[in-house]
Amino acid sequence: MNDWFAIRTAPQRELAVEAMLRRKGYKVFLPVERKIKTGRAMRGKRMAVVHRVYPMFTRYLFIGGEFSWLHLMAENHVTGVVGFDGCPAPIANAEIERVRAMSGSNIPHRFSENPHRAIRTGELAEISFGPFAGQIVKVEGLHGRKAKIFLNLFGARKSVEIDVANLEAA
């Protein structure tokens, strides 16, 4: 079987579901982003650099191979499957390989925040870091340090929030 399926998990349970399903013998793939976080401790001293792993697609992971839908849907924190008209929608192996190439340690760590030009609602910006680096997007809204943009994911236009630090004014 070369097809994969996207399954939905409970909020913030992607890593736990991936580990649980892998232990039970399922063929799973969880695309992740590795981010480096730094901060300041009290009195201006630098804190240690922390490497964190975040799912690329909040609440989703992929499953392939032979398995029972009945058993899979009975697993803890598995809440659904992506599909159309009540039928799970298969994802070609080639598409999964494209996502796999963007996932995890394949992404160079780059931190960029353009101090010369602000990101503004309604203007174009380039994604400078992460799996969609290089794409030009329109900024639909700003809320604090987050920007609302639209991305084409698996053939559908999805609203996504991204850190403003990961955008460069185009």
Image: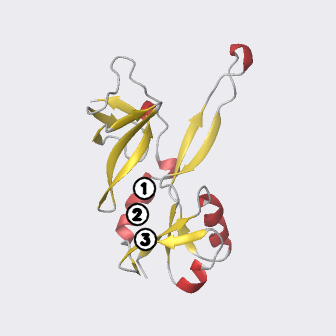
Q: Which residue is mark 1?
A: 101
Residue 67 visible in rendering: no
Q: Residue at x 41, y 77 (%)?
A: 3
Question: Label 2: few (<14), some or many (≥20) within 10 Å?
Answer: few
Q: Which residue is mark 3?
A: 82
x and y, in percent, of residue 1 in the image:
43, 82
Residue type, label 2: Glu
* 161 on left or right of 30: left
Q: Which numbered tag is attached to residue 69?
A: none
- Asked if the residue under mark 1 is in contact with the one under mark 2, i.e. CB atoms within 8 Å, the reply is yes
Residue type, label 1: Ala
x and y, in percent, of residue 142 in the image:
39, 33
Q: Which residue is mark 2?
A: 97
* Quadrant position of the C terminus in the picture: top left
x and y, in percent, of residue 73 in the image:
57, 78
Residue type, label 3: Val
Secondary structure of the residue carrying numbered label 1: helix
Secondary structure of the residue carrying numbered label 2: helix
